[in-house]
Amino acid sequence: MGMKLYLSNCAHCHSWSGAGGALTDGRWAPEIHDATPREIYEAMVTGPGAMPMFSDTVITSDEKQELISYVKTLQDEPNAGGVFDLARVGQVAEGLISWTIGLALIIACAIWITAKQRAHD
C-alpha cells in the first residue's frame, strides 16, 4: 500500500528511488534518503516549498504511516551500482544514456572508417 501511495503521489517529483528531481521554474524536489519519519510526516502535512499539502482527507493518517514505511525501505535499500553509478535515476534514464553513448560510438567508428578509406583511395 505504501509503494502504491508513493508512486501515485510522490514519485513524479522525488523520483521512484527517492533521489529527488528537477521541477518547473528552476525548483528542485529534495532527495528523501536522509529524512526521518517525523520530517516526512511534517512535509506531507505542511507542504514545504512546491510540495502540496496532503491533509487527512487526501491521505489518511494510516496511509501516511504506510507511505513512511515504504520510504524507509527505500532508504535502507542498497544501491545496486553497476559499471556506472548513476545515482539510481531510473531504468529509462540509464537505458537512454547507454543507448546514446552506444550510438555515438558506432557513428564515430563509421566516420573514422570512412575517413580512413577516403585517405587510402
Image (cartoon, grey):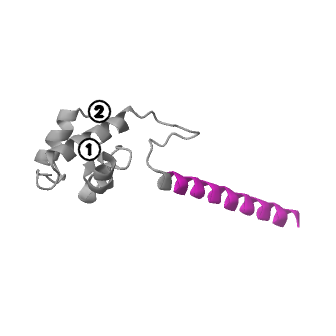
Q: Earlier in the sequence, mark 1 or mark 2?
A: 2
Label 1: few (<14), some or many (≥20) within 10 Å?
Answer: many
Query: Does residue 99 appear in this view?
Result: yes
Chief secondary structure of the magenta portion: helix
Residue 43 is covered by the magenta coloring: no
How far apart marks 1 and 2 lie (CA) works out to 15 Å
Q: Residue at x 22, y 34 (%)?
A: 37
Query: Does residue 32 appear in this view?
Result: no
* 41 left or right of 13 in image: left
* Numbered disc 2: secondary structure: loop
Disc tally is 2
Per the rendered image, the range of residues in magenta is 94-121
Q: Which residue is mark 2?
A: 34
* Numbered disc 1: secondary structure: helix
Q: Which residue is mark 1?
A: 67
- Out of 109 and 53, give the one closest to the viewer: 53
Residue kind at label 1, given as amino acid type? Leu
Residue 107 is covered by the magenta coloring: yes
- Out of 82 and 36, give the one closest to the viewer: 36
- The numbered disc on residue 43 is none
* 115 left or right of 79 in image: right
Residue kind at label 2, given as amino acid type? Asp
Rendering quarter of residue 58: bottom left
* 121 left or right of 49 in image: right
